Amino acid sequence: LPNQPSQAAEIVMSLLGKDAFNSFSHKAQLNIPYSSFKFTKPYIIIHIGASKPARLWPIDLFEKVLTLSAKQETQILITGLRQQSDYENKINEIIEANNQTNKIINLMGKTTIQDLLSIVSRAKGLISVDTSIVHWARIFQTPNFSFLGQSDSNLFGGQFKFFKKSDSLGVQNLECHDRKTFHGMQLNWMSMCGYDECPLAERHCFTMLDDQKIKLRLNSFLSSL
């Protein structure tokens, strides 16, 4: 195990050995699951579906991301788990406000895991909070942008040499972060949150994101697709 900051993927590959690095770098043939969803136009994905409230998209951040993404010509798929009705209603209002050309398709609560795997593997890009779908995108070499939220960038950030167009944005070293070591190791190089629900009045890991930085980084990502 690492004695200094290391990416989660790098830790796994180090344990597997050099062959794993070689296979990943050449993108070994993967068995892509079948999906009942067929999309003829290129699309990007905005994924809502974190199951834990502490990781769930803040409404205002989703609105910023969708508004910026809707300026692109590409079709947009909204995916994720079903949420509480008031949250879903707000999301639907934002989608309707930005869907003037009917290019945004809301698939929240309508996909299986197999559907999602297939959809992600064929997407032009993915935008998500840090959750499982981001790791799938990296495996499939689908360009991805993640908002880290409570995650530590040393472990889960996007900059890793085998990831194709993988970027992430987060607020680091927050006092509210309660995890400072990796699996109990006596190393103080982590800074992440272990709560399922944020105990604070607001989630600083999202509210302290810089609006200008969001716009610049996300526009750069979108223009690269």
Image (tube, helix red, strand yellow):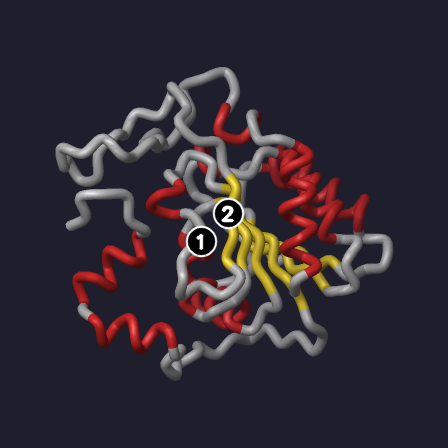
> Where residue 162 appears, x then y in whole percent?
40, 66
Q: What residue is shown with label 2?
A: 168
Judging depth in this view, the residue of 223 and 107 nearest the camera is 223
Q: CA distance from mark 1 to mark 2?
A: 8 Å
Q: Within 10 angstroms of label 1, few (less than 14), some, or many (20 or more) residues?
A: some
* Residue 3 placement, left or right of 121: left
Mark 1 or mark 2, which is nearer to you? 1
The type of residue carrying mark 2 is Ser
* Residue 128 placement, left or right of 6: right
The type of residue carrying mark 1 is Gln
Q: Which mark is residue 25?
A: none
At numbered mark 2, what does the secondary structure look like: helix, strand or loop? strand
Asked which quadrant contains residue 154, the reply is top left
The residue sitting at 62% across, 33% down in the picture is: 86
Q: Are marks 1 and 2 in contact (CB under 8 Å)?
A: yes
> Where residue 199 appears, x then y in whole percent?
40, 19
Give the quarter of the figure containing the C terminus.
bottom right
